[in-house]
Amino acid sequence: MKQKWAKSHSAYVIGSGPNGLTAAVTLAKAGIAVTVLEAAPIIGGGARSGELTLPGFVHDIGSAVHPMAVASPVLRTFPLHQHGLSWIQPPVPLAHPLDDGSAAVLAGSLEETAWRLESDGSSYRRTMGPLLERWQDLFSDILSPLGFPKHPLLLARFGMLAAWPATWVARVLFSTTPAKALFAGLAAHSVLPLETLISASFGWVLGLTAHAVGWPIPRGGAQLISNALASYFESLGGRIVTGTEVTSLDELQDAELVLCDVTPRQLLKIAGSKLPAGYSRKLQNYRYGAGVFKLDWALDSPIPWRAADCSRAGTVHLGGTLEEIAASERAPSRGTVSDRPLVILTQPSLFDASRAPAGKHTAWAYCHVPNGSRVDMTERIESQVERFAPGFRNTILARSVMAPGDLERYDANLVGGDIGGGVQDLGQMFLRPNAGLYRTPRKGLYLCSSSTPPGGGVHGMCGYNAALAAIKDDS
């Protein structure tokens, strides 16, 4: 008879990002004694907050808006509200301003979005409606590792929409500039050229989340997500040790199980000498994606948007037309930067007064650049904001600048500024980092980061799936 896990057994999770903490919770709920080891002095990985500019201004250092956290099949089952996490829903999930002073709007309601898209509304409603009716079933399949789906016909329907390049989908389904631009901005979250197969999938998933669960922000900042996960984990008997970097598996000789919330590069550093040469080569060949150049601002007043809808939106996409956005997202893959990049911007203090002193505000923004780029995008990003909000620069009290290298120093998982844990194209979306997914050739050693399915985003499913694999292997 195989031995069952017992509290006397020693398990470690390396890394305290949302995936690492979700893995730790899942193991703890299965009766496993777990210790989380975090190199940084503060938990959270890509979900942390801090005063990056001026005292009293709270900025999200990594992720900021979290539809996937609310839609996540696993995080929805955790009592995180009992551990200090509450959500704020901005009146409008997303606004996409255009040069004529108007804005395309992704509303929480499918019907309102369709109405705002005018002549393209019926096409949008006809396409999105059937997915929205069964969004929980769909998400349970697309956030699971590759295998036979529970809802094959529903997943096939989604696949017929998702498999194509975003530019092709936008031009086939929509005829107006606002609808095409709105979809292009959504699809750009793929961090792929929009002419790439499956880039459309990100547009459909993010549009669907807006109608199903909204695009909420955590009250107090992204750090509150990590803190709630940590508090829940500790309530289950788990232990967290910060300021402890693991550089070799030899440091964890008492461990029978180790789950690593790290990318392939860090896994090679930690365990390379104990892995077969063939597997190590696969990790070495893992491809990282475009980087991010990020700005945070302390503002004297709200951003003075020309389009009123932007002042009601938690997230604003600044990129103009489909053609502009496609050019912007094509540039990093060619090793260049765009003079008019798509800027993804959030303005949490409009809806959460805890983020800034009374009467003041914060904003968070980034654009995509080549991996490891050293080009300063500050002027380009701020010019895009000024383009749609004349007078914006006059509101700036202070700014924080984080180039790809700064992001990697902040979190080693952000290799070259890649916030997705690796390219999520057709070759690396489903079999990441390789066909083994969470499992490695070394017994008891698993990967649980966004470099495993379903990839980037604050949803915890990579950690959950890895923990389930570990539990199954021992049962």
Image (cartoon, grey):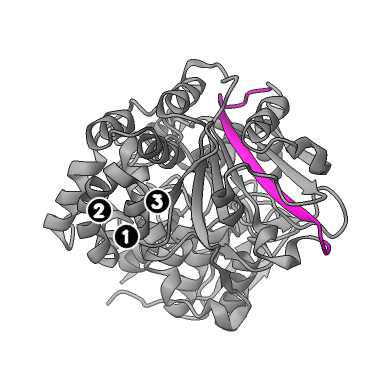
Look at the image and tell me in which quarter the N terminus lies.
Answer: bottom left
Upstream in sequence: badge 3 or badge 1:
1
- Three-letter amino acid code at the position of disc 2: Arg
Residue range highlighted in magenta:
357-374
- Secondary structure category for the residue under label 2: helix
Upstream in sequence: badge 1 or badge 2:
1
* Picture layout, residue 396 above or below residue 356: above
Which residue is depicted at the point 25% across and 34% down?
Answer: 164
- Three-letter amino acid code at the position of disc 1: Glu
- Distance from label 2 to label 3 (Cα)? 15 Å
Look at the image and tell me in which quarter the C terminus lies.
Answer: bottom left
Residue 129 falls left or right of residue 375: left
- Distance from label 1 to label 2 (Cα)? 7 Å
* Picture layout, residue 249 above or below residue 426: below
Question: Can residue 436 be seen in this snapshot?
Answer: no
Q: Residue furthest right?
A: 55
In the rendered image, which residue does mark 1 sit on? Answer: 111
Q: Which mark is residue 125?
A: 2
Membership of 322 in magenta stretch = no
In the rendered image, which residue does mark 3 sit on? Answer: 206
